[in-house]
Amino acid sequence: MHAVVLGTGMIGTTVVRELAKFSAITTVTAVDGSQHMVDRCLEKADNPKVIGRTASLSSVGDLVDILEDADVAVGCLPHSLSLTAVRAAIASRCHLVDLVGSLFQEKLELDSEAREAGVTIVPGCGVAPGITNFLAAQGIELLDSADHAVMICGGIPRMPLPPLWYQVVFRLESVLGLYTKPAAAIRNDRIVEFPALSELESMTFPYPVGACEAVITDAHSTAYTLLGKVKNLTEKTVRYPGHWSKMKVLAELGFLEDRPIEVEGIQTTPRKVSEQILAPQMVGESNEDVTVVRVEVFGMKDGRQTTHKWELVDNYDHQRGITSMAKTTALPAVIAAKWLAENRIPEKGVMPIESIAVRDRFDPFLDELKNLGITIDYQQSV
C-alpha cells in the first residue's frame, strides 16, 4: 500500500514516521510546498520506505497529481485546504484521513461521490475532533438512553507564562478559530449555535495540570452524527484560569475580526495584526506541553442513572521528541490510515471517526492507541 502524507509540519512528520513502521504500508510519500520541510521530514523519519516530494498543494488539480497513484492519504494541511483535499481524494479514488474537522456539512455533501468512487473519507480524525468524538459515541452506545455527552479537550503548556498562560502547539490560525467561530452543539434534541467564548466553566485535572477553565467550542461532526442519539451534546476547550477572559476582551473589541481595514495606507485585517502581536505572547517556558481529555456521557441503563467517563492526561513525548498535542493529534489518524490499508474499514463515503471506532471496533482502536503511547482511563458510575 502506498500512503501519501500532505503537509510535513510537526504533526505531518509524526504521521510519516509512524506510518512507515507498519508492514501494510510499503511506501510513504511525504509532500509539502517547501523543500526544506520535506528534507527535515525525511531526516526525522529516517526510513527507506519514505520518499519526499515538493509540490503545490493549493488546488484540486495539484492534489490529484499527487494522489492519483496512492491508496490512502493523510491530510495535515491548513483548514483552508481541507475541503480541497477531500475533493481531490475522491477524484483520485484515494482514501483520505483528514485532521481537520471544520466544514463537515460541506464534506458530507460529497458522501455519494465518495461512495461512487469506492473511497472512505475520514474527516476530523485527531484528538478533538477525533478521540473525543468516538469516546462520546461509544458512551452513547453503552446506554439505553443518553441525556448529555460532554467532550472536553485542551493542549496547554507544562510551564505556562503570563500574560496569556498558553503556548501555540499547532497553527495559530486554528487557535484563533476557536476564539471567533460560533459553536455548534445539541440542546434538547436540536442543533443550536452558541457565541464563541461562551459558557465559561471551572474544572480541575490531575497533576501536573490542576485548575483550569473551559468554554464551549464547535462540536464538529458529532453535532450531526449523534443528533437523535443524545439529548444534549457539548464540546469544550481547556485553558489555564484567566486566559479566556483576556481573549474575550480582545474579541469584543474587534481585534480578532477578519473585516478589511486600512492602516497607514496598508490593507490588512484586525486578526492579521493581532496574530503578529499575540504570537510572541503565546510562548511557553519550554516546548513541553500537556494534552487533557475528559469525555462524560450521562443517561439511563437498565433503569438506573449511569455515567461513562474517559480521561487522558498526556505529557510531552520525550522519546519521540514531539509535543503531546502533535502525538495525540497524529496517532489517531495514523491508526485510521493503517486500518484503511488493511481493509479493516469496509464502509465507503464520508465516515467520521465516531462512525468507525465504536461498538466492536472501539476496544481494538483504544488498544492500538495504547500500544502507541496514548492511554485513556475509563470509569463507570451508577
Image (cartoon, rainbow, N blue to C red):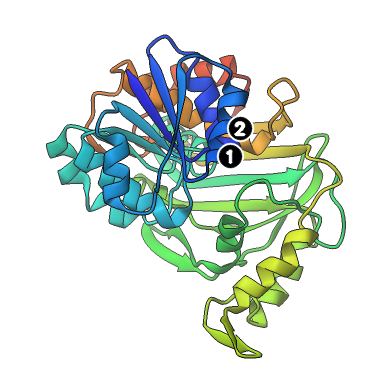
Badge 1 amino acid: His
Where is residue 13, by image quadrant? top right
Identify which residue is drawn at 60% across, 46% down: 152
Task: Determine which residue is flagged by label 2.
Answer: 40
Determine whether, in the image, residue 340 is placed left or right of residue 125. Answer: left
> Are circles 1 and 2 on residues that touch, CB within 8 Å?
yes
Residue toward you, 71 or 344? 71
Q: What x and y, as percent, mark residue 91?
A: 20, 42
Badge 2 amino acid: Arg
Q: CA distance from mark 1 to mark 2?
A: 6 Å
What numbered label is drawn on residue 36? 1
Residue that extends furthest to the left in the rendered view of this protein: 116
Residue toward you, 215 or 77? 77
Is residue 307 in view from this perspective?
no
Determine whether, in the image, residue 232 is placed left or right of residue 213. Answer: left
Q: What x and y, as percent, mark residue 73?
A: 36, 32
Q: What x and y, as percent, mark residue 4?
A: 39, 30
**Disc 1, SS:** helix
Quadrant containing the C terminus in the rendered view = top right
Image vertical order of residue 47 relative to residue 106, above or below:
above
